[in-house]
Image: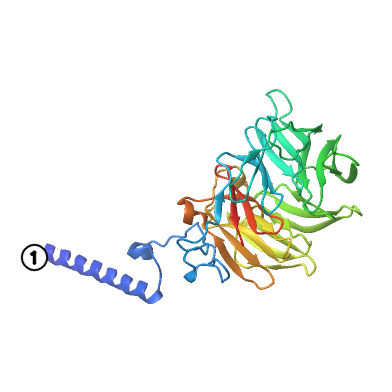
Amino acid sequence: MNRRKIIIVAIIVFLLGTGGYLLLRRGDTGTKGGGIFSSIFPTSPDVPVNPPATGGAGGGGDSGGEDGQTAGSPKRLFQLTQTAISGSVAVSTSTVRYIERQTGRVYEISPEGEGMKRITSTTILKTTDSFFSPKGDEVLIRYEQAEGEAKLQNFLAHIPSATSTPLELTGAFIAKSAGFAAGRADDSLFYLEKSGNYTNGILTNFKNEKRKLIFFSPFGEFNTDFPNKDTVILLTKPSYSAPGFLYSINTKSQKLDKILGGIAGLTGLLSGDGKWVYYSESVNRLIKTKFFDILSKQSQDLGVNTLPEKCVWSRIKNDVIYCAVPSLIPGANYPDDWYQGLVSFDDNIWQISLGTGETSVILSPDFYLGEGTDAVNLSLSPEESYLLYTNKKDGTLWSYKLK
């Protein structure tokens, strides 16, 4: 055998030996996926997976599907609209009201997609957001104005009862404002308005009567929420590049308290009883979500990561929250990139109980649809028998029967 053949044989033996060693090493460590080359050139994935559910209804296992349904079982997921909406509310177990985004018309439909009826004849083009009163008979509509005028207009409207003929939407305009929040327990409304160099926080109702100043500040960049009749929430505009702060205002005493602060990308959602905040922060281009106990000032991590904007607290069981949780979270600047539409999620709907620590997947939309859903604006019917959400991908309204 000449020298050249010896060298070639030696190289082949070396490669085979190295490959065999790596395969055996992979088998010993139990590493999943990647093959030989991932052992030679290790990679760090940028899409963390949320953990599997720890139990509960619809958590998988022998239930027949990730949402707990088996073939032939009653339908539980319903598409309520074919077009985008700007807001919705479940006014009863049998009725959902919503506003069509492009026309501003108000419609009624059952939570199972039956008996759709147009309530109003008034057309308001290019609505962006709609904030309903809990009973669904009053609404604040924000819409884009014609070019050259104020970008957004705000219209407080009374919604007539359903009749055989659509009726005119009546109401009044209010001044251009920086943010709105509708009370979840009554017909209260809170909004921010500019006054000289200050931003005023106004407490009023859907007729804009008995206005009451409960807050003012030289700083006006806040997101607002109104989780119960005694508490308004102010959240500094969230960004990965800036520390965020979350405050509460007592609507009676007008006392301002800081709940959380100095957290990059902070977003948060206060429970209806005011005891918990579900909050997220931006960490290494990912999302980290925790529960904050306001009384003990301690945080609890249940390992389920999402943005609080994709959640709703139960009002019947105060320690239960429903959330749209991404299956995968790509590395990005959160929440900015998601707000701007640069990142989109494919969600499962989870039920999380703080009392027991139990987490359960109750719905996987792509199980039915064959495509992902980026769920936002979650809400519950009064008896919490239905969960409503909007698909951020196309703005359509959906309903899921919980019981």
Asked whether 268 or 85 is in front, the reply is 85
Q: Position of residue 16 (x, y in %)?
A: 23, 69
Question: Given the current orientation, which residue lies at the most extreme left position?
Answer: 1
Total marks placed: 1
Please name the colour scheme applied to the rendered image: rainbow
Looking at the rendered structure, the kind of residue marked 1 is Asn
View extreme (front): residue: 164
Q: Quadrant of residue 264?
A: bottom right
- Horizontally, residue 162 falls left or right of residue 338, namely right
Q: Position of residue 179 (x, y in %)?
A: 76, 42
- Vertical arrangement, residue 82 with respect to residue 328, above or below: above
Q: Residues within 10 Å of mark 1 (few under 14, many from 20)?
A: few
Q: Which residue is mark 1?
A: 2
Q: Nearer the viewer, residue 323 or 90?
A: 90
Residue displayed at 79% across by 54% down: 185
Establish if 400 lies above or below 301: above
Query: Which one is nearer the viewer's eye here, 278 or 124?
Result: 124
Judge whether residue 212 can be spotted in this image.
yes
Q: Quadrant of the N terminus?
A: bottom left
* Residue 283 vertical position relative to residue 18 in the rendered view, above or below: above
Q: Quadrant of residue 385?
A: bottom right
Residue 70: image location, x then y, percent: 47, 63
**Quarter of the image that includes the C terminus:** bottom right
Q: Which residue appears farthest toward the bottom when viewing the image? A: 28
Front-lying residue, 34 or 346:
346
Is the residue 376 above or below the residue 353 in the image? above
Q: Residue at x 56, y 71 (%)?
A: 54
User: In the displayed structure, does residue 32 sit left or right of residue 21?
Assistant: right
Q: Residue at x 56, y 64 (%)?
A: 361
Could you tell me residue 10's position as x and y percent? 19, 68
Which element is circle 1 on? Answer: loop
Residue found at x 48% / y 51%: 369
